[in-house]
Amino acid sequence: MADMITMDLVSPEKLLLSDEFEMVVLPGAEGDFGVLAGHSPITSSLRPGVISIYEGDKEKERIFVNGGFAEVSNDKLTVLAEEAVYVADLDQANLEQRIQNAREDEEDAKDDETRRRAAENRDHLQQLLDAMN
Amino acid sequence: MANLKELKNRIGSVKSTQKITKAMKMVAAAKLRHAEEAANAARPYAERMDSMMASLASGMAGRDDAPKLLSGTGSDQRHLIIAATGERGLCGGFNNSIAKAVSQRVDKLIASGKEVKILCVGKKGRDALKRKYGHLIIDLVDLSGSKRIGFSDALPIAHRVLGMFDAGEFDVCTIFYAKFVSVMTQEVQGQQIIPAPVTENATTETSDVVYEYEPDEEEILAELLPRNLSVQIFRALLENSASEQGARMSAMENATRNAGEMIDKLTLQYNRERQAAITSELIEIISGAEAL
């Protein structure tokens, strides 16, 4: 049995998940990165995207997070996410609603920075929607 | 005889009041359990956020380019006070003690020549503060629509506060709420949330680990601070809802007990009166018979 990494996924309202996994791939702000046991300590912000949990070579679980933070220390991975949903539980209507919201954010944005963020968010949601179909 | 009837009505009404207070106590107890669960469930997130904040902030403290949310605007002239209270009364001194703490702070700040603005969360607080500080209250956040406090209730408040801060409308923000200690005790607290206070003790244990940061410390911190603010507000709201239910529970328990005592007293009086009426009737009959 390979070494395992403990992952805690917490949202402001509750602890969503706490378990041991072989590998977790996180949507880091500067690109996806995988975390295995023995990873060096790192703190990273996350962009909205999908956390993939691998068991062996197979993808076991996919969780959508709406941005957040990840911290690795002492073989423990902590993900702070304001919102997290299992991809299996996401439906198309919900995603389309989110895309719609992001589009409105983009239109309402007052400065370039927020507009850029909203656009990024919308792109990403669109990718997610495409990935589902 | 009218007196007897009156007493009986009175006993009846006290009894139905007692039923209501008893029911309210039980409802408050059930809600308190939920509120405590919610507060406990929210703890891991807040704790981890704290430790992350502490390890990042200790590196940034004292630097000129530190974010304003952390280092402040360099002045403490204008204050924003968030008064978080309940939406309903009948919960003992809960709303009043928060309002009192707020008004003490406001008086102190005004006396030292600061500008103060008040943002009320929960309408009971506004009702209590309106008369004295009506011109300082900028808005009321009404939470009566949401049955259980969720993170989605805290977010708009945080966004609003951040928007005001970015627009330079205040320098220091403090939130007043009642911290839940036990059913009997709730402590009113004034917690400063902007500039973010850095907890000293948390830094010592994390400082020996060298972290990599992605993208880099400043950017993470810039993202972390606004989120931390919403978490702090959320935590305050949760503590507040647990305190409110606790206060209501003990207030209603007292009311139920008082109603019980009153019923006992009234029943005793009723029985005495009834006895007296019977005795006087008997005396009338006997003396009537003797006269014949």
Image (cartoon, coloured by chain):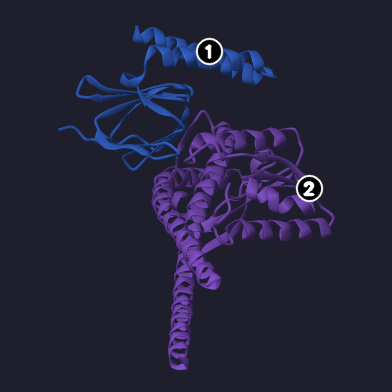
Q: Tell me residue A54's x, y (percent).
A: 25, 24
User: Who is closer to the viewer here, B156 or B58?
Assistant: B156
Q: Amino acid at mark 1?
A: Gln
Outermost residue, front side: B292
In the rendered image, is residue A124 in sight?
no
Task: Residue under label 1, please give it.
Answer: A100
Q: Residue at x 26, y 37 (%)?
A: A19
Q: Residue at x 66, y 16 (%)?
A: A108
Callout 1 secondary element: helix
Q: Residue at x 48, y 67 (%)?
A: B8
Query: What is the quadrant of residue A74 in the picture?
Result: top left
Task: Residue under label 2, please give it.
Answer: B134
Callout 2 secondary element: loop
Q: Amino acid at mark 2?
A: Gly
User: Who is closer to the viewer here, B55 or B237?
Assistant: B237
Chain shaded purple: B
Count all numbered tags in the image, as a single digit.
Answer: 2
Chain A is which colour? blue
Which of labels 2 and 1 is toward the front? 2
Residue B240 drawn above or below residue B188: above
Callout 1: residue from which chain? A
In the rendered image, is residue B106 in sight?
yes
